[in-house]
Amino acid sequence: EVQLLDSGGGLVQPGGSLRLSCAASGFTFSSYAMSWVRQAPGKGLEWVSGISGSGGSTYYADSVKGRFTISRDNSKNTLYLQMNSLTAEDTALYFCAKNPRARSGGYFDYWGQGTLVTVSS
Amino acid sequence: EIVLTQSPATLSLSPGERATLSCRASQSVSSYLAWYQQRPGQAPRLLIYDASNRATGIPARFSGSGSGTDFTLTVSSLEPEDFAVYYCQQHSNWPPITFGQGTRLEIK
């Protein structure tokens, strides 16, 4: 059974940093691209970043480019999102999501439960 | 960036009725469109991929159609658990991958 367990969220001050993690199980992690998708309170879904199965290709939304870094450790079956220079606009529930193939892009066939990031002083 | 516009914003129907949800793209996405269901307090769940293919475990009452810029998600006979928010998503021209703003399906 595919499982994605998001963690690392919390309350952080504007300008601060946070690292999210997504522990994967139930599938061959390195064979699939992964993404982070966020949802601000009461709002819709926004794709944030994606990474290929090997980790060699990464992609970002313009809203986070230069501030967020996606990475993965295939030996630990874990996806990460390093978030720096956080602003109130980054407040959201962050989901990790699995792609159906190694190449990035595509739809998302499995989702984590989400981890809440709140940026506030 | 491809913009997806969903309509209506809210759809009020009764159990047993047929629901028709629309998603329109600002430019052609071929068939690279997916639909998701999100119940309150839950993560999104994949319903339809590549415009018309049901995901694993999705009931046959859910169907998708369309190509190019106009897409439809149909629920043939609504069950109580179908009342939720539905999102479309394109992956034709990315980054960025984009989602529609959602359609809320509520009980009338």
Image (spheres, coloured by chain):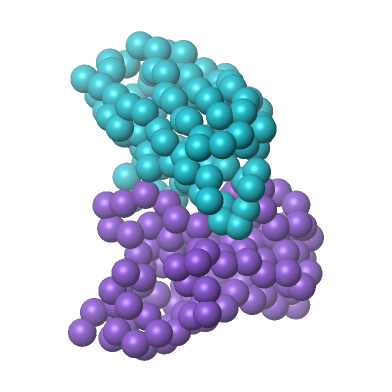
Chain colours: A purple, B cyan
> With B67 as the anchor, is B104 left or right in this view?
left
Residue A98: % across, % down: 63, 55
Q: Quadrant of residue B106?
A: top left
Q: Is residue A4 visible?
A: no
| Residue at the image position 50 percent from the left and 57 percent from the top | A47
| Residue at the image position 36 percent from the left and 88 percent from the top | A16
| Residue at the image position 36 percent from the left and 28 percent from the top | B7
Residue B69: % across, % down: 56, 29
> With B87 as the anchor, is A58 left or right in this view?
right
Residue A36: % across, % down: 53, 63
Q: Quadrant of residue A63?
A: bottom left
Q: Is residue A101 visible?
A: yes
Q: Judge by depth and name the residue closer to the eye, B108 or B93.
A: B93
Q: Judge by depth and name the residue closer to the eye, A112 or B35.
A: B35
Instruction: Classify B16 as above or below B59.
Output: above
| Residue at the image position 39 percent from the left and 18 percent from the top | B19
Count of numbered marks: 0
Q: Judge by depth and name the residue closer to the eye, B103 or A95.
A: B103
Instruction: Classify B104 as above or below A50.
Output: above
Q: Judge by depth and name the residue closer to the eye, B59 or A108.
A: A108
> With B82 as the anchor, is A47 left or right in this view?
right
Image quadrant in which the C terminus of chain B is located: top left
Residue A92: % across, % down: 35, 64
